[in-house]
Image (spheres, grey):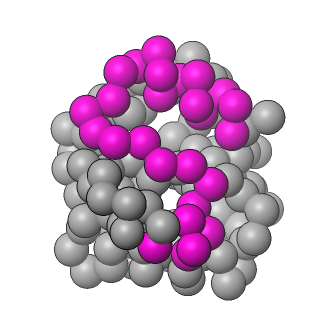
Amino acid sequence: MKYIMVIDDSPTIRTSIQFAIKETGYPVVPADNGRVALEKVKELKEKGDELALVMVDVNMPEMDGITFIKHFRQEDRFTPILVLTTESQNEKIKEGKDAGASGWMVKPFQQPQLLQTVQRLVR
């Protein structure tokens, strides 16, 4: 089974992303920070499941999104990672891309735009 992981410390944002992408048909695995997400990735792989896409915020407690991407890329170089954040500075975007992000979208997002981006990345 393939999943989409949504990593954001805001339960409201996680729910709105899940709602926005439900028509992709992929089940969503939520996590509230990068550390929890890495544990969930490990659990999925142990069950033989995969990720179709990871969506991650930048600013979170315990482990931020950029740090998560760096750790995740040590294990998985191919799964697309979409950063969904309020951060729009070029330096931050470059830092994310250098860490291994596949795309960058600034919140608040429009549902059709998010869905289109997700569908493009999971193909």
Q: Residue 104 placed where, x, y %?
A: 48, 49
Outermost residue to the front: 90
Q: Residue 1, image x and y in percent? A: 75, 45
> Quick one: 33 or 123, which is closer to the camera?
123
Residue 96 as seen in the image, left or right of residue 90: right
Query: In the rendered image, which quarter contains the C terminus?
Result: top right
- Rendered image quadrant of residue 67: bottom left
Q: What residue is shown at x 72% (from left), y 58% (from top)? A: 79
The residue shown at (31%, 52%) is: 88
The question of residue 6 being in magenta is answered with: no
Q: Note whether residue 69 is visible.
A: yes
- List x then y, in percent, for residue 7: 39, 56
Question: Residue at image x 21%, y 74%?
Answer: 61
As displayed, is residue 9 above or below residue 110?
below
Q: Residue at x 28, y 39 (%)?
A: 107
Q: Is residue 72 left or right of residue 1?
A: left
Compared to residue 92, the image places residue 72 above or below, namely below
Q: Read off the magenta span.
A: 95-121
Left/right of residue 22 with respect to residue 60 in the rendered view: right
Question: Quick check: can you spot residue 32?
Answer: no
**Rendered position, 100 above or below 7:** below
Q: Is residue 7 left or right of residue 99?
A: left
Depth order, front residue of 14/67:
67
Whether residue 113 is in magenta: the answer is yes
Horizontal and vertical percent position of residue 112: 47, 15
